[in-house]
Amino acid sequence: MINEIDLPEEDSEQPVKTIHALASYLLDRHIDPMHEESIIDRIHEILSEMAIVSGFDGALEWQNDVQTSSGMAISVNEAARCLLDYRRTGQFLRGIHQAILDARDRYPGETIEVLYAGCGPYAPFLTLVAPFFTPEEVQFTLVEINGESLSVAQMLIREMELGAYLRESFHEDAILLKLPDPERFHILFSETMDAALEREPIVSILLNLLPQLREDVFVLPRNVIVEGVFYREKDLSKGLDGLWDPANEDEGFSIGIVMDLKEALGTYLSMPPPPDLIFHELQLKLPHAEWREYLALQTTVDIWEGFTLFKNESDITDLRVRKLDDLPSCEYINFEYELVDEPMLAFGVSMEEWEE
Ligand SMILES: C[S@@+](CC[C@H](N)C(=O)[O-])C[C@H]1O[C@@H](n2cnc3c(N)ncnc32)[C@H](O)[C@@H]1O
């Protein structure tokens, strides 16, 4: 473990150099979680001073979410606070850095073009990543629906003298955007999701952008898996709250994968658009009645080869748990994910099995 003493001294004259030195520690895939946290805290301190957005105060409009055509784009402040979701930021940073290296290997001599959909005010996966490369090696295109977030990100990029890495910016809804030259992009990066794929619009963003991009485009995250697990009160060694304890080993009863995002996108995009808003539906067999107390939706985010966020490691993989009161007599649980204002994996139960 590298300890605190090894961190670079903050140089108020050269904040950009300090940020880069700090970010290089984050590339260590075996980084100690406490160390990761303190480095990201320090990056946040510097960025919030440069960007004048900390995520915790500021203008009233920085607190407003923006409704997209399907899902909520979070406010300037909430997007800034995402940086402090430590494991998320660390794993996505290592993932995009590795993906750029992999793209360079696959396309030697080409400038790697990254489409960054949903950059927030710090655009951290540009501002922290670009300095590891030259502008000839990598270029970024930003898409952001929140005009305030985009203006702050552009100002920060200028302040950090990273303008040479910024190809273009779109103040647009990534769900509706028609890219002028989609073939150009090697990598699509979008962290516009919440746990169990609820609320935020990643599904609709991917549904819009993927058909425009080359078939072999690298997508980060590569996949999101949501599994359904039933728990019983009597098996919970530390009560319900214990389920969020990272060390928790209480055994549940898995009913299987409720959504495999990559597979669901492939299925949806291979068929003519349906007349309704249903993106994905699935029926699974319920466990025996004695298990039907709590249903947990357990999210795993596969960011890139070797970089995964597991259950409860981050806000976007936090367990979502529902108490199941007074279920009628039933055999099946039916899930549905609709592309509506507030998307989520909704479920109901039934006695009958769906017809094939
Ligand atoms: C979870 S934040 C992530 C911010 C930053 N990339 C990070 O990881 O720290 C998601 C960002 O995506 C933006 N966003 C959400 N939906 C969008 C859409 N449909 N089109 C463009 N931007 C969107 C939000 O405004 C927000 O700034």
Image: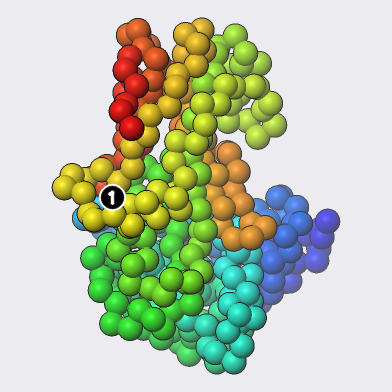
Q: Vertically, is 242 above or below 344?
A: above
Is 329 on the left-hand or right-hand side of 80? Answer: left
Is 209 on the left-hand or right-hand side of 12? Answer: left
| Mark 1 vs ligand 1: CB below 8 Å | yes
Q: Does residue 288 show up?
A: yes
Q: Does residue 10 show up?
A: no
In the picture of the structure, the residue carrying the numbered disc 1 is 71
Name the residue at 54% across, 49% down. Answer: 301
The answer to which of 12 and 170 lies nearer the viewer is 170
Q: Vertically, is 291 above or below 161?
A: above
For mark 1, give the secondary structure.
loop
Name the residue at 70% across, 50% down. Answer: 33
Q: Quadrant of the C terminus?
A: top left
Name the residue at 82% across, 60% down. Answer: 2
Name the residue at 28% across, 50% down. Answer: 71
Residue 249, image x and y in percent? 68, 26
Residue 281, image x and y in percent? 33, 37
Amino acid type assigned to the residue bearing label 1 in the image: Gly
Rendering quarter of residue 163: bottom left
Instruction: Determine crowd level at label 1: few under 14, some 14-19, many 20+ residues with C-alpha closer than 10 A.
Output: many
Q: Quadrant of the N terminus?
A: bottom right
Q: Vertically, is 254 above or below 172?
A: above
Residue 47, image x and y in percent? 51, 68
